[in-house]
Structures are given as structure tokens and as C-alpha cells.
Image (cartoon, grey):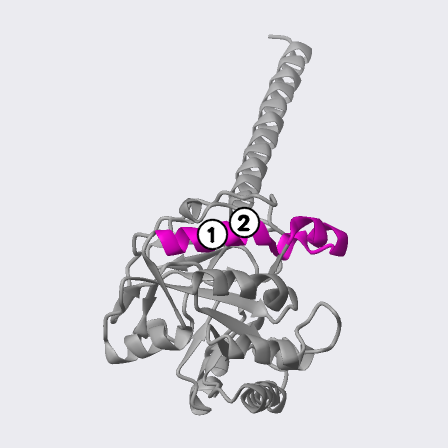
Amino acid sequence: MPAKRKSRNRKKYNSIWQNFIFVTLISAILIGLFLTINTHAQKIPSKIAVNISLGTKAISILPKYTPLISPYPTVSITPSPVPLTGFCLHVPILTYHHIQPEAVAKELGQVSLTVDSGVFDQQMAYLASNGYTPIWVNELINALLTHSSLPGKPIVITMDDGYADNAVYALPILQKYGIKANLMLTSGLVGGNPDMLTWDQVNQMKGSGLVYFTNHTWSHYTITNGTQDKIESEIDLAQAQIQEHTGQTINVFTYPYGSLNSNATATLQRKGYIGALSTIPGQYQCDSFIMALHRTRIGNGSLAGYGI
């Protein structure tokens, strides 16, 4: 075969081989890029939810101040227990913030944290007519500590922060049905603006005989941050103020924003706190996590939609 022809064939062969290698490399790069993007996409948490692992079951929880997707959500909650340890009781703890007419909430820009007062009335009527026994959170904690049963179908109502509408709208409804509730009070915000309770209103709620108070810090401070002195002053000042104004012993804590860690729980226990409430969802309470009791955030829907 002539040398020139051999040279042309070799160049043609080399060109085909180089093209094959190039296409193969590009394909491999594209496949790798796709797999990488897909893998990372599965790991990116939702902007409105945080996934935590509890036992073998993943649970999605809304951060405390994340707006509800709809003002009238229907949330399906499965009340069956995940793997739990220690002495446990089935006691749902319901979380509320503002309770007021929806029209007022819209004017004030508080829809995401509000349960309409008419809906709240319906929810309390549902509890009363379905045999539930509303209790104070210290009654639940004492039952866990002593491994005791609780009467009827126990349930705990909690209202966070200390908003004035809790006295104006929620208290008359609680009195209407004789329902006990728990107020998670941020003492330094009392009387701070028209949205917050005054001490007179706090005493009004205490005088009803239906409301139990827990420490929610002095300024709604995240006690996983800052110096130890700051953490302890937030706890101690709120405790002193609430005890002074209500005469109630304060030894139950509610974590602002649901933020907790080992130092926060250890600090509370050193100070004599017997239990604390988190924002971790769940309807079973155990002595093994008595410093991080589980709660269900409630919106403008039927309590049956929450597995209650």
C-alpha cells in the first residue's frame, strides 16, 4: 500500500478514535454531574421544614415562627408511637400563639401565628364533648416522674409568649368550657406594647383558676446562645418576676424557638426545673425526654385533623 494512503488511513483512524474518546469523556462528565446534583437535591432541607430523626422514623417540623402554608390547614398526625424509651404516656400537648378574630390578625399582620377565636371555641368544644381531660403541664411532668397514670384522655393546652389576646379572647372560651391551659410567659415583654399581656391581665388569668405559667425567659432569648451568665440571667429574672406577680412556683420551662442543647437542659436541671417543653412534634411523652417534651402546633382546622 502506498505510504501516502497508509498515512491518510492512520490519520482517519486516529481522528475517529479521538472523537470516540472525547464523546465518552463528555458523557461520563454529564452523567456524573447529573448524579451529583440529584444526590445533593435529596439532601437539601425544605426552606420551611426541618427534618429530624427520632428512632427509625423521620419527622418534619415547622420552625416555631414559620408562617403556616394556609390559614386553614388540615394536618394529618399519626398518634402511634415511634420507638420510645422509659415510662411513657399518650398525652398530646397543643401549641397556640395568638388567639383572636382572623380579621384582626390580618390587620395586625399576625395571621401566621393566629388561630381564629371562633375556631378556637370549636376546638375547645370538641375536647369537652369528646371526653378529653385538659391538665396543666406540671401534672403531666409529675405523672412521668412518679410513673403514674392520668385521668380520662389527658391533653395539655399551651399558649406561647404572652399575647394580650390570650386574656381577651382565649380566657373567656376556656372559662366557657372549664378547660385548663398553660401560658408560656416571656416576662420582660409583659406590658411592653399593646400586643402583650399586662401584669393585671396575667393576674386575671391566674385568678381564673384555669391557667398555669411556665418560664419562657425574660426577653424570649435562645438559651443555646451567648454567655452562661446571660443564659442564667434570662432564666432567673423571668422566674423571679413570674413568681412575684402570680405567687406560683416556677419550675417548668418552655424553650424560645424550640432551641435547646445539653447545656440548656443541664442548666435548667441544676436550677431545679423538673421539666421543659420543646417544639419537637409528637403525642407521646416519656420520662427519658422530660426536659424536651413534645408538642403539636395547631392551626385553623379541626382537631381531628391533627389526630386528636
Residue 107 is inside the magenta segment: yes
- What range of the chain is rendered magenta? 101-129
- Answer yes or no: do the residues labelled 2 and 1 have beta carbons within 8 Å? yes
In the image: residue 99, left or right of residue 248: right
Residue 14 is inside the magenta segment: no
Classed neighbour count for the residue bearing mark 1: other residues with Cα under 10 Å, few (<14), some (14–19), many (≥20): some
Asked if residue 174 is positioned above or below residue 235 in the image, the reply reads above
Asked if residue 46 is positioned above or below residue 98 in the image, the reply reads above
Residue 111, percent from left and from top: 66, 52
Residue carrying label 1: 123
Residue 187, picture quadrant: bottom right
Residue carrying label 2: 119
| Res 264 visible | yes
Q: Main secondary structure of the magenta part?
A: helix
- The image quadrant where one finds the N terminus is top right
Q: Residue at x 54, y 89 (%)?
A: 243
The amino acid type of the residue labelled 1 equals Gln
In the image: residue 142, left or right of residue 293: left
Residue 138, picture quadrant: bottom left
C-alpha distance separating marks 2 and 1: 6 Å
Residue 227, percent from left and from top: 62, 87
Residue 258, percent from left and from top: 53, 68
